[in-house]
Image (spheres, helix red, strand yellow):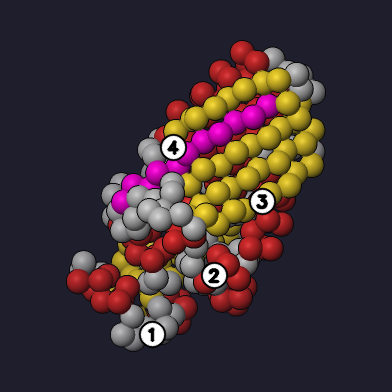
């Protein structure tokens, strides 16, 4: 029986490189290829120095490998829209870190178990990964009618892709809060803070609930912190307060510092969540073959 599932990372940028660092600790996943489209990419050079196969042929290199079953796409939305059907036709499962949202939204602490056999899953957004677990934690005990989240990140951790897709971020995150978090209606706001030194990621959840019970809500939120900490050790609960039918939760996310700086918790939570999904899918695949 196989002991690990072969994987590839598409996109050797900062996200792909940080993801590689995390996946090298995954017990059921073996990254065998890092692929990009620029031959002299620093990310490809780093991957090669770490002993991985590398290629500047992008998706073509991945499709040509029979020993790769999981593909982490850390490129861009348009690229993934083109890659997704090719990967599906080749029988490879895709974990999408772009805003393409070809497959269902997955937040590991909430709904990973429901999607272990899907051929394509989407990681929502950094704000979604940080706040949807807490909307869900409130909803499971108090029934959320409306949720609003504010994700505040360091401007230094927001690259060109983030800046170009801010409108998409708010729409995607709001939809994820409803579809995965359980809120009947949702809104998402992102704030880029230019402070120097850079701030850590901070997220605030405001929720209107139908069944307010402060003790039950705090218990559920605290349990979610524990669940989320299993793959995002830098999450910290700052506030959980219930006032009538309004609930406020504030959390702080510190990155693990694997490749990205610790203040880039918004990027770190995406790679940590993607690595957790990959590990879960790989364990499921191996278990089915036992």
Q: Could you tell which of marks 2 and 3 lies nearer the N-terminus?
A: 2
| Callout 1: SS | loop
Q: Earlier in the sequence, mark 4 or mark 3?
A: 3
Task: Give the mark nearest the N terminus, 2 or 4.
Answer: 2
Q: Which residues are magenta?
A: 247-257
| Callout 2 touching callout 4 (CB < 8 Å) | no
Q: Residues within 10 Å of mark 2 (few under 14, many from 20)?
A: few
Identified at 40% across, 44% down, the residue is 254
Identify whether 262 is placed above or below 239. below
Comparing marks 4 and 3, which lies closer to the viewer?
A: 3
Q: Which residue is mark 4?
A: 235
Q: CA distance from mark 2 to mark 4?
A: 24 Å
Quarter of the image holding residue 119?
Answer: bottom right
Residue 158 percent coordinates (x, y) = 50, 62
Sooner in the amino-acid sequence: mark 1 or mark 2:
1
Frontmost of labels 3 and 1 is 3
Total labels drawn = 4
Above/below status of 162 relative to 154 = below
Residue 255 location in percent, x, y?
A: 38, 48
Give the residue displayed 52% in from the left and 71% down from the top. Answer: 160
C-alpha gap between disc 1 and disc 4: 35 Å
Residue highlighted by disc 3: 189
Q: Which residue is mark 1?
A: 38
Q: Few, some or many C-alpha atoms within 10 Å of disc 3 (few <14, some 14-19, many ≥20)?
A: some
Q: CA distance from mark 1 to mark 2?
A: 18 Å
Residue 30 vs residue 236, the one in the foreground: 236
């Amino acid at each position: 029986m196989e002991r690990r599932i072969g994987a590839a990372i598409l996109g050797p940028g900062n996200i792909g490189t940080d993801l590689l660092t995390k996946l090298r600790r995954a017990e059921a996943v073996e990254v065998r290829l890092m692929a990009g489209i620029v031959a002299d990419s620093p990310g490809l050079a780093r991957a090669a120095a770490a002993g991985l196969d590398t290629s500047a042929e992008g998706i073509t290199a991945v499709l040509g490998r029979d020993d790769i079953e999981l593909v982490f796409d850390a490129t861009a939305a348009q690229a993934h829209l083109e890659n997704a059907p090719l990967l599906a036709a080749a029988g490879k499962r895709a974990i999408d870190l772009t805003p393409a949202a070809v497959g269902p939204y997955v937040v590991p602490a909430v709904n990973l178990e429901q999607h272990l056999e899907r051929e394509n899953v989407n990681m929502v957004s950094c704000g979604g990964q940080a706040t949807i677990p807490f909307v869900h934690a409130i909803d499971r005990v108090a029934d959320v009618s409306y949720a609003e989240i504010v994700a505040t990140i360091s401007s230094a951790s927001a690259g060109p892709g983030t800046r170009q897709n801010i409108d998409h971020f708010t729409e995607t995150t709001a939809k994820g809060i409803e579809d995965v978090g359980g809120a009947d209606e949702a809104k998402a706001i992102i704030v880029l803070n230019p402070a120097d030194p850079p701030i850590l990621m901070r997220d605030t959840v405001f929720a209107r609930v139908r069944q307010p019970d402060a003790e039950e809500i705090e218990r559920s939120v605290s349990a979610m912190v524990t669940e989320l900490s299993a793959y995002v050790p830098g999450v910290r609960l700052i506030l959980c307060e219930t006032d009538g039918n309004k609930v406020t939760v504030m959390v702080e996310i510190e990155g693990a510092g694997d490749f990205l700086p610790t203040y880039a918790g918004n990027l770190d939570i995406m790679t940590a969540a993607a690595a957790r999904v990959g590990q879960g899918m790989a364990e499921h695949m191996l278990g089915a073959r036992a």
